Amino acid sequence: MQIVITVTPDNQLSLSTSQDLNYNQLTDILGTAQMSIFRGLVNIVKEKEDIEEDTKLIMDLKEELWDQYNQTASNILDEMIPAHMRPDLSEQAILAEENKLWEKQLKQKQSPFKVVK
């Protein structure tokens, strides 16, 4: 199968495939491509710095990739269904839920932090 992604003159993306794909197939393929890009970036840094996977630099990179991907996904979802139409998914609502999880972990005396070498 061949998938071609082209940037048009007006900065939009055009996608064409050599066979018909349903939505699930397309999102799986795009997700696999994104994960491949993430792994490639991590491997470039590991090789350039001659370091292992579980170092602070690699964890910092992964967290940055996570944050950027999360922001991109949020932007896409917000364009599809704007935040004012989903108040239960506002930043305030999500923060409130996160705070509940933190409180639960603290009550159980579990550290919410992972030790990174």
Image (spheres, helix red, strand yellow):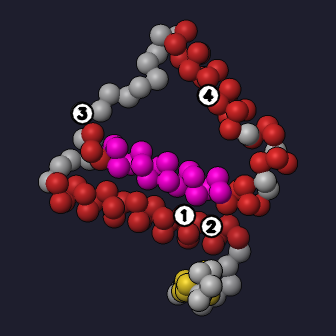
Q: Amino acid at mark 3?
A: Lys
Check the image and name the residue furthest to the left: 50
Q: Please name whichever residue, 18 or 30, is drawn nearer the observer in this view of the structure.
A: 30
Q: Which mark is residue 110?
A: none
**What's the CA distance linking mark 4 and mark 3?**
26 Å
**What's the CA distance linking mark 1 and mark 2?**
6 Å
N-terminal of the pair, mark 4 or mark 3, is: 4
Q: Nearer the viewer, mark 2 or mark 4?
A: 4
N-terminal of the pair, mark 2 or mark 3, is: 2
- Residue at image mark 4: 98
Residue 18 location, quadrant: bottom right
- Residue at image mark 2: 27
**What's the CA distance linking mark 2 and mark 3?**
34 Å
Report if residue 15 is visible in the image.
Answer: no
Does the residue at mark 1 contact the one at mark 2 (Cβ under 8 Å)? yes
Q: Residue 99's spot in the image, x, y percent?
A: 61, 23
- Residue at image mark 1: 31
Q: Amino acid at mark 4?
A: Glu
Q: Which residues are magenta?
A: 59-75
Question: Badge 2: few (under 14), some or many (20 or more) residues near its Cα, within 10 Å?
Answer: few
**What's the CA distance linking mark 3 and mark 1?**
29 Å
Q: Amino acid at mark 2?
A: Thr
Determine whether, in the image, residue 71 is placed left or right of residue 20.
left
Q: Residue at x 72, y 32 (%)?
A: 93
- Residue at image mark 3: 117
Does the residue at mark 1 contact the one at mark 4 (Cβ under 8 Å)? no
Report if residue 16 is visible in the image.
Answer: yes
57 drawn magenta:
no
Q: Nearer the viewer, mark 4 or mark 3?
A: 4
Identify the element where label 3 is drawn: loop
Q: Please name whichever residue, 92 or 39, is drawn nearer the observer in this view of the structure.
A: 92
Q: Amino acid at mark 1?
A: Gly
